[in-house]
Image: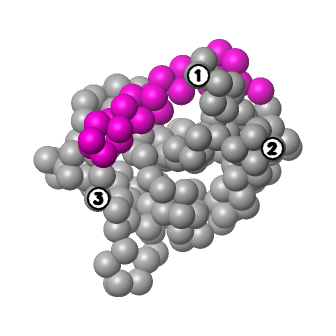
Amino acid sequence: MVVKSVLAGLCLAGLSSVALAQNAQPYGKGFDNWNFSRTKEQSGVTNCRAFRRVGGRDDIMAMRTDGYSYLSVRAEGRNGKFPNSIIVPLREPANGMQWDNTIAADGKRMWVALPPAAIEIIASKGGYSMLLGGSEDRDDVNLGKSAPAAWKRVKECVVDSGG
């Protein structure tokens, strides 16, 4: 049952990137290459995002008012689901902190659902690495020194939007 809800959420996250381009509204002033938006989705849920484009990357940290949160990057041609993937914070001391999850990609975007507390840790470490299950593929995502402030703004957006 949990797997089905995670996979359904992953599909919603992918669809949400389409919504970003269609009816996103800015949320506050951007800083350090981070910009913010919120999108009222068809279900009535609001999706709050921090996004930035640096060095050809498109990084997103997001949370919806229903508590669903995720990270997303360009898929760079990757497509499908990658079960047994591992997400680890950058610059993490060797204490074994990692999240095992399914990463999904649609050719344009790649995303992974994580608890808000996990994204908070990742933001505090300035980024994360994704090791795609069933492959030798790895993607390192540097979110920069302002990632904690960007994640804080996402959480403020969720509260302001009724979450």
- Observer-side mark, 3 or 1, equals 1
Residue 43: mark in rendering: 1
Residue identifier under label 2: 160
Label 2 residue SS: helix
> Reading the chain from its start, which is encountered first: label 3 or label 1?
1
Task: Specify the farthest residue to the right.
Answer: 29
- Mark 1 Cα within 10 Å, few/some/many (few <14, many 20+)? few
Q: Nearer the viewer, residue 16 or 32?
A: 16
2 or 3: mark nearer the eye: 2
* Residue 137 is at least partly visible in this image: no
Residue 128 is left or right of residue 137, and the answer is: right
Q: Residue at x 59, y 69 (%)?
A: 124
The colouring scheme, among rainbow, by chain, secondary structure or one colour, is one colour
Q: What residue type is labelled 3?
A: Asp
Residue drawn at x 43%, y 77% as measured from the top left? 92
Q: Which quarter of the figure is the N terminus placed in?
A: top left
Residue, disc 3: 100
Q: How far apart are marks 2 and 3 (CA)?
A: 31 Å
Is residue 155 visible in this depiction of the protein?
yes
Q: Give the range drawn in magenta.
A: 1-25
Q: Are marks 3 and 1 in contact (CB under 8 Å)?
A: no
Mark 3, secondary structure of its residue: strand
> Which residue type carries mark 1?
Ser
> Could you tell me the amino acid type at mark 2?
Asp
- Residue 137 position within the rendered picture, expressed as x and y whole percent measured from the top left: 23, 49
In reply to whether residue 7 is colored magenta, the answer given is: yes
- For mark 2, does the 10 Å Cα neighbourhood hold few (<14), some (14 to 19), or many (20 or more) residues? few
